[in-house]
Amino acid sequence: MAKSIVSPIPGVFYRRPAPDKDVFVKEGDQVKADDVIGLVEVMKNFYEIKAEADGVIERFLVEEEGLLDSGQEIAILIEK
Amino acid sequence: MIKVKNPGLQTTVQDYGRIGFYEVGMPPSGAMDKYSYTASNLLVGNDENAAVLEVTYLGPVLEFQQDAVIAITGGEIPPKINGEPVSMWETLSIKAGDELSFDFVKGGARVYLAVAGGIDVPQIMDSRSTYTLCGIGGLEGRALQAGDVLQVGTDHHHVVKSGTRILEELIPVFSKRHEIRVVIGLCSYRLTEESKERFFSIDWTVTPEANRVGYRFKGERLNFVEREQPFGAGSNPSNVVDLGYPIGSIQVPDGIEPIALLNDAVTGGGYATVCTIISTDLNKMAQIKTNEKVRFIPVAIEEALQARKEHKQKILQMKKHIEGNLEGQMNG
C-alpha cells in the first residue's frame, strides 16, 4: 500500500545528516518504522522525519533543501 | 506534577514577560501572542501573569500526574486527551494519569496551555519566562526536554466551570496571508523613496529563520539613501549610530532581508529600523508560520492606539463572560 510521509512542520528539507554525509535513504531503499528519512530545519532546530511503517521508499517528492509547508508530502512509502 | 513524555519542537514556559529591564539589555521574552495567552489564563481562573506553556508548530506529549483544570488557546494545533479530540478556547478537566497530546498544526503557529495555578518555576528578574539565549527563566533556562517534570503553582484566584468557552466572535481565525500594521520610523529616512514604497507594496515571505528572537523575510532588495558615514555608525548604508530598538521594529541589514525583532531580540544596535509593528499585531505575528506571506500596512499612531483599545475591550469582554461561569473563589 502506498502511503505518503508528510512533514508536520514548515521548514527546509534535508536528505542528509550533514552536507558531507550520504543521504539517509535512497529511492528504492528498504526502511523500518521509525527510521529517519530526512530532516526539516526551522527556527534553528532540526526535526527528524521518520518512516511510520516498514516498507520501501518509492520516491521523494521534495528536493534537497526544498522549502516545505506544514502538512506537505515528502516521500511515498510502499508499505509491506 | 506534569511529566514531559515528548517535548514537541520548541515548548517553553512563558508568562507576561520580564518587563522593566529593557534599558539594561534584557528583552521581555514572555508569551508572543498575548491575546491567546491571556485567554488561556482567564479560562482556568489564573492570575493574568501566570506562567503557561508556549508550544510552537508541534505539540508536546504530557502526562498529568494530578487532576488539573487546563485551557488551550492560540493557533490551531488540535489537542487530544488520551487520544480523544478536545476543544480549544475552553476550560477542560484532566485527570491524574491522562495524557495530553496534539495533532499536526492546521492554522497559526503557537498554542498556549494554561494549567490552573500556573507552571511553577523560579522567578528570575520578576518573571518565569524562558529566555533561551541567556539560559534564564522557565525550566533551567531552556525549552522542555523529554523526562522533564513540571510543578503546578498557586497563581489562581477563581475556579472556572469546565466547559466554559471563549465567545465565538472573540476567537481569532488564521490564514496564510497576513496584514501586519506598522508605524513608520525611527530611521525610515535612510530608505530611498522608491524602496519605502516597495516595502509596503510587495508580499514578504517568512523564511525558516523565524523564531522568538525575530522573523526574517524574503522579498526584494531595498536601497538606502547615499550619505557620508556619520561618526559612530558602521560603514554599511543600513547602519546608523546605535539606538534602542523598539520591540517589533523592522530592520534591513544591508538592504537584503528585513528582520522583525520580537520578544527575545537584542534591545539595541546599529541597524536602521524602518518601522515598528503595532503592539496588537505582535500577537498576529506570533501566529505566522515559515513560508506564509506578510504585507506590511503603514498606519498612524492614533490607529495603533485605537487597536490597542479594542484589544483591551475584547479582553474585558472575555473576563466578564468568564466571571459568569465561576464555581468559587480560591482562598488566600
Image (cartoon, coloured by chain):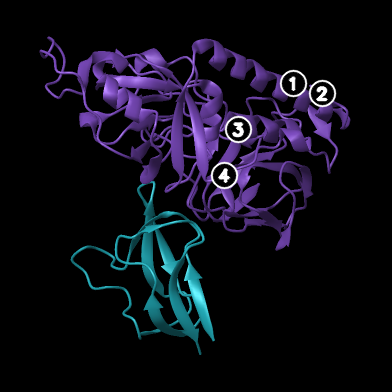
Chain colours: A cyan, B purple
**Observer-nearest residue: A2 or B196?**
B196
Q: Nearer the viewer, mark 4 or mark 1?
A: 4
Cα distance between the residues tagged 3 and 2: 22 Å
Left of B168 or right of it: where is B232? left
The tag on residue B51 is 3
What is the chain identity of the residue bearing mark 1? B
Mark 4, secondary structure of its residue: loop
Q: Looking at the image, tell me whether mark 4 or mark 1 is earlier in sequence order.
A: 4
Mark 3, secondary structure of its residue: loop
Cα distance between the residues tagged 2 and 4: 28 Å
Horizontal and vertical percent position of residue B258: 32, 32
Left of B166 or right of it: where is B12? left
Horizontal and vertical percent position of residue B34: 59, 29
Horizontal and vertical percent position of residue B93: 79, 47
- Number of residues whose C-alpha sits closer than 10 Å to that of mark 4, classed few (under 14), some (14–19) or many (20 or more): few
Residue type, mark 1 in image: Leu
**Which residue was labeled with disc 4?**
B175
Asked if both marks, 3 and 2, belong to the same chain, the answer given is: yes
Cα distance between the residues tagged 1 and 2: 6 Å
Left of B284 or right of it: where is B131? left
**Which residue was labeled with disc 2?**
B320
What is the chain identity of the residue bearing mark 3? B
Residue type, mark 2 in image: Lys
Residue type, mark 3 in image: Ala
Cα distance between the residues tagged 4 and 1: 25 Å
Q: Nearer the viewer, mark 3 or mark 1?
A: 1
Q: Say if mark 1 contacts mark 2, CB within 8 Å.
A: yes
Asked if both marks, 4 and 3, belong to the same chain, the answer given is: yes
**Which residue was labeled with disc 1?**
B316
Q: Is residue B2 visible?
A: yes
Left of B185 or right of it: where is B241? left
Q: Nearer the viewer, mark 4 or mark 3?
A: 4
